[in-house]
Image (cartoon, rainbow, N blue to C red):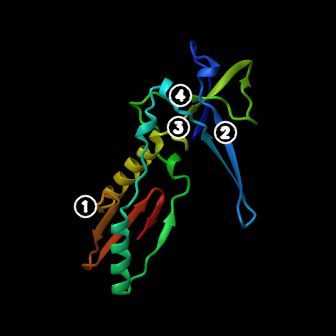
Amino acid sequence: KTLTPVPIPPGVREEDLLELKTIYVNKPDGRKKARTVAAAHKRALKKRNIDFGRTFSPTVRASTARMCCGVSVELGLTIRGGDVKSAYTIPEWPAHLPKQLGRMPSGYQSVIDGIKHCVELGNIYGLPPAGKHWWNHLKAWLLNFGMEQSPHDPCLFSKFGDNGDRRYLIVFVDDILR
C-alpha cells in the first residue's frame, strides 16, 4: 500500500529520486519488524518543493494531560492507552499534492521486464507532510464518530454518552489515551 513500483517517468533522473532505507528492529518478544522510511535530507526535499520546516505532529499540551490524569484519579476513573500501528501510513496521499518518487529500497528488484522502476510513495515515515496527513485523517475520523474537539487544546476530544457520562480522549502523535 505504501510503496508502489512504477516505471521511472521520462525526464526524471535517478539522482532526483528520494533515497529510501529500511530500518530493522528486533522486538523484545523475538518478533522482527521492518519499516521503510524516506532518508530525507533538507536539500533533497527543498529541490522537490517540500518545506522541511513545516513538519507536524499532533501533541497534547502537558497541562491538558496533567488535568485529565488528575481528574481521572480524583474521580477514580481508569485511563486506557493505545498506540496506532503504522499511523503515518494509514491515510491516502492527498490527490492535490504531486506524488513523491523514491529509489527502490535495497533488496527490491529495480529492473522489471527490462524497464527501470522507482516507487511511488504514499505517506511514509520521513516525509514531512506525513504527520499532517495522519492528523487530518484522525481528526476527521474522531469528529465523524461524534467526538468534539476542544477549543483550548486541539489534541483533546470529548463526547457525551447516552447516560450523561463524558468520555475524553487525548492524542500524542500516534498514541491515544482515553
Judged by depth in the image, the label closer to the viewer, 2 or 4, is 4
Instruction: Give the residue displayed 50% in from the left and 48% down from the top.
Output: 88
Q: Is residue 42 above or below residue 123?
A: above
Judged by depth in the image, the label closer to the viewer, 3 or 4, is 4
The residue carrying pointer 3 sits among few (fewer than 14), some (14 to 19) or many (20 or more) residues within 10 Å by Cα, namely many
Sequence order check: which comes first, mark 3 or mark 2?
2
Q: Position of residue 167 (x, y in %)?
A: 33, 73
Instruction: Give the residue displayed 55% in from the left and 44% down from the top.
Output: 125
The residue carrying pointer 2 sits among few (fewer than 14), some (14 to 19) or many (20 or more) residues within 10 Å by Cα, namely some
The residue carrying pointer 4 sits among few (fewer than 14), some (14 to 19) or many (20 or more) residues within 10 Å by Cα, namely few
Q: Which residue is mark 1?
A: 152
Q: Is residue 38 above or below residue 46?
A: below
Sequence order check: which comes first, mark 3 or mark 4?
4
* Mark 2 vs mark 4, CA separation in Å: 17 Å
Sequence order check: which comes first, mark 4 or mark 1?
4
Q: Position of residue 159 (x, y in %)?
A: 29, 68
Tag 2: residue type?
Answer: Lys
Q: Which residue is mark 4?
A: 43
Q: Which residue is mark 2?
A: 21
Q: Position of residue 169 (x, y in %)?
A: 37, 67
Q: Which mark is residue 122?
A: 3
Q: Position of residue 144 (x, y in %)?
A: 32, 56
Sequence order check: which comes first, mark 2 or mark 4?
2
Tag 4: residue type?
Answer: Arg
